[in-house]
Every structure is written in structure tokens, then in C-alpha cells.
Image: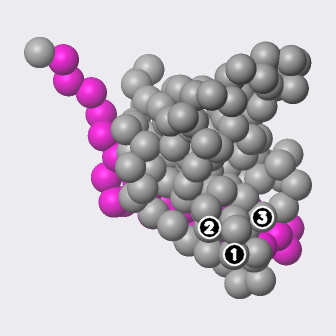
Amino acid sequence: MFTKPVLSLVDIKAVAAAAETYALEHNWAVVIAICDDGGHLLWLQRLDGVAPVSAEIAPAKARTAALGRRPSKIYEDIINDGRTSFLSVSALTGMLEGGEPLIVDGHCVGAIGVSGVKSAEDAQIAQAGVRALTVR
């Protein structure tokens, strides 16, 4: 039998708080979503002023990063490099930059997805959340 770490509510709150702080420091209105390693939503936070569609996109980015155990940008790059058949992967709907896996002791324990500003900025916010988990 294998054992692995799992996200606690304390972990989730720390990741979300770090991402929120980073977004607010830059005056970026975003949605922050955190899911477990199976892509199940554990946290959704919608900052004031963000477009409603971001509440759909952020969890999709998180799910994609969790299931793939890699940043969601990788899939965006694959598609942009011409492998459009990758769009047929029905489980991955957030193949856009802004989803980052949460890795602990080599295990993917979940992911964070952010949506609301430019994709590279979404990724910066998500990475701030990732750093909060690794610091703990």
C-alpha cells in the first residue's frame, strides 16, 4: 500500500491567501480555485470586479493542472504548436495558462487555477499560491 500527503483545509487557506494577497497587491480582480489531486473543487474565491466567466475558467485550469500533474500552460503550448487534436481530450477543459499543480514530497496533492487577468498574470498569482504551500 502506498501513502501520500493530502491537502488540509489549513493548506488550502494558506495557498488561497497567498494568491489573493499577490492579486490584490497588483490590483488584479481574479477568481482563485483550488482542487484536490482528482480535480475536485475544494476552494473557489471570486474577487470583486472579476468577470463572471472566470468562475468557470479558474476551476477548469486547476483541474487540468491536477489531472496532468503539470502547469496548464503546457497544454496550451502543445495546441498552439499545432497539435490541435489535443482539444479532443474531454477531461481537460482548462488548457490555458494559469493552472499550477501543488506538489508535496514529489506527489501532486492538487492544483490552483486563476482566471481574470492576462494568462501570464494568472500564472504569477497561481505560483504565489504554490510558494505558500512549499514554505509551510
Quarter holding residue 3 = top left
Mark 1 and mark 2 in contact? Answer it, CB < 8 Å: yes
Q: Quickly name the residue at label 1.
A: 52
Mark 3 and mark 1 in contact? Answer it, CB < 8 Å: no
Q: Nearer the viewer, mark 3 or mark 1?
A: 1
C-alpha distance separating marks 3 and 2: 9 Å
Q: Quadrant of the N terminus?
A: top left
Q: Quickly name the residue at label 3.
A: 116
Q: Is residue 68 magenta?
A: no
Q: For the magenta stretch, what is the residue range?
A: 2-29
Q: Which mark, by number, is residue 55? A: 2
| Left or right of 15 in this view: 19 | right
| Residue at x 64% of width, y 44% of height | 94
Q: Is residue 52 visible?
A: yes
C-alpha distance separating marks 1 and 2: 6 Å
* SS of the residue under disc 1: loop
**Secondary structure predominantly adopted by residues drawn in magenta:** helix
Nearer to me, 52 or 125: 52
Q: Position of residue 77 (x, y in %)?
A: 81, 25
Q: Residues within 10 Å of mark 1 (few under 14, many from 20)?
A: few
Q: Position of residue 12 (x, y in %)?
A: 43, 57
